[in-house]
Image: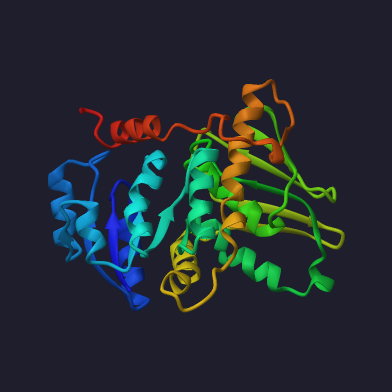
Amino acid sequence: MKIGVVDVDTSHPQNWIPIERELGHEVTCVWDGGAVHPKEYVEKFATDHKLTVCTSLEDMVKQVDCAIIHGCDWDTHVTKAQPFVEAGKSVLIDKPVAGSVADLKQFQTWVDQGARISGGSSLRFCAEVAAWLAVPVEERGTPHTVVCGCAVDDFNYGIHAYSMLGCILGAGAKSVRHLGKGVQRRIQITWPDGRMGFLIVGQGAVWMPFYAQITTERKVHQIVADNKTLYRCLLQAALPYLSGQTPPPISFQELVEPERWAIAARLSWQNGDAEIQLADLSEKDSGYDGADFAVDYRKSRYPKG
């Protein structure tokens, strides 16, 4: 495919482009909304990666088969994806896909209408978890209680832990409950058959790796994800689908269930740690504010303004 890069807010674009090219795709152009970096940064980014700079998203639509949206303000993902979806182009959305039920519903509607959309956290396709799942169930057992965690923040980074849990236990959870905030937030996710996942996310004293402890009726297994392989795992899973060569690696509904869990967790701690039934989530429930996150992210990169 010919790929266009939408927003260069984070370190992901510069790390993904070489992998995308190694996988046989042509990364051709970039457009940036200016949420984080000044124009000069974008121009240098384009030069360094041999890209042309588009003057608008509509300009990019004419030049590419697929857009990869890296904006750290997840509240803009729907608006930025729309011109590509309407033109029949594929879209990969960097994590988190969206921070509200309404935006997740819009993406699902487009997928139901035939749009090719993928993305999310690379932990959903974690090689270490995939290797564990490939072990015969007779040997490893069936997971019944899983703990996943990471640090940094509740959602932008926390979504990785939610997605790692989704990779291990799959979709179909029924409820989410915040269990209180100690050093980090602790969250319980329950499945209808009694399986449980526990998440430890949010700001900690130091950076922590992505980790999981899986308990089955046969064994206890511990995983720490290798950061060096994560991006490739996601791109190898998503790009063949986005180019029309394969079915989606997983359904879109399953892909974004971790975002729904995270929204429910926030709703729980806003309501005295009440148990939130996922079936009851609605568009009126407030989610995570992408614009606020983008402002803070810019300040962390440019503390002097």
Question: Total of numbered circles in the picture?
Answer: 0
**Image check: 131 left or right of 207?**
right
**Viewer-side residue, 81 vs 35:** 81
Place of residue 213 in the rendered image (x, y in percent of width and height, measured from the top left):
70, 52
**Please, which residue is most extreme toward the top here?**
272
Q: Position of residue 253 (x, y in %)?
A: 60, 55
Q: Position of residue 125 (x, y in %)?
A: 56, 63
Q: Residue at x 27, y 38 (%)?
A: 35
User: Dividing the picture into quarters, in which one does residue 235 lie?
Assistant: bottom left
Query: In the rendered image, which quarter is residue 291 located in?
Result: top left
In the rendered image, the vertical position of residue 250 relative to residue 265, given as above or below: below
Viewed as shown, does residue 146 lie left or right of 201?
right
* Nearer-the-camera pick, 148 or 73: 73
- Which residue does the image show at 71% across and 41% down from the upper left? 279
Depth check, front residue: 194 or 33: 33
> Viewed as shown, does residue 34 lie left or right of 112?
left
Q: Colour scheme used in the picture? A: rainbow
Residue at coordinates 60% horizontally, 31% vertically from top-left?
A: 266
Quadrant where the C terminus lies? top left
Q: Is residue 176 above or below residue 166?
A: above
Q: In the rendered image, is residue 181 in sight?
A: no
Residue at 59%, 65% (x, y): give it: 250
Query: Does the rendering let one see residue 202?
Result: yes
Q: Please state if 144 lies on the left or on the right of 94 as rendered.
A: right
Q: Kindly indicate the quadrant of the structure image that contains residue 270.
A: top right
Q: Position of residue 95 (x, y in %)?
A: 46, 50
The quarter of the image holding the N terminus is bottom left
